[in-house]
Image (cartoon, helix red, strand yellow):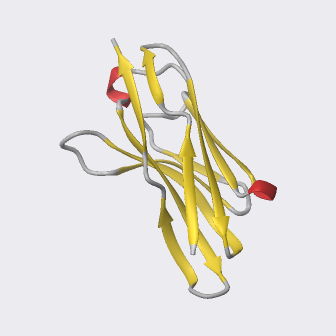
Amino acid sequence: QVQLVESGGGLVQAGGSLRLSCAASGSIISINSMGWYRQAPGKQRELVAVIIGSGSTNAADSVKGRFTISRDNAKNTVFLQLNSLKPEDTAVYYCNAAVVTSTTGWRNYWGQGTQVTVSS
């Protein structure tokens, strides 16, 4: 089994910054990709940013230039630096990882979510 534990959410004023972290643990053989999604009230969950094993990244147009995803492969941890936050960035942010384990093979895992609230 794999666990994803997120941290770093909170309340911040518009223009401020936050840094989210997500650490994966368990019977991990390899992690193909790690990323962040978000879900605002009444809206569907959407991709924020993803980083794959090679280190290449992809991000939603709405966050490009403001959010940066990075990864510490040795610690199976992914980070999301959120700068120049806007009220419309308010959402629950979920960590996602595509993981290969010794017992289940390849599976997609989700964290429990961390709330980011941006006040105007």
Q: Position of residue 54 (x, y in %)?
A: 74, 61
On screen, residue 30 versus residue 58, left or right, reads right
75, 17: nearer the viewer? 75
On screen, residue 66 versus residue 25, left or right, reads left
Quadrant where the C terminus lies? top left
- The number of numbered discs placed on residues in the rendered structure image is 0
Quadrant where the N terminus lies? bottom right
Q: Is residue 21 above or below residue 109?
A: above
Q: Position of residue 62 (x, y in %)?
A: 41, 34
Q: Quadrant of residue 86?
A: top left
Q: Residue at x 22, y 39 (%)?
A: 41
Q: Residue at x 63, y 59 (%)?
A: 24
46, 65: nearer the viewer? 46
Q: Is residue 66 above or below residue 111?
A: above
Q: Residue at x 45, y 43 (%)?
A: 60
Considering every residue shown, the one lying at the far left of the view is 42
On screen, residue 106 versus residue 119, left or right, reads right
Q: Position of residue 110 (x, y in %)?
A: 47, 61
Q: Residue at x 22, y 45 (%)?
A: 43
Q: Is residue 28 above or below residue 19?
A: below
Q: Quadrant of residue 7?
A: top right
Q: Position of residue 26 (x, y in %)?
A: 65, 70
Considering every residue shown, the one lying at the far right of the view is 74
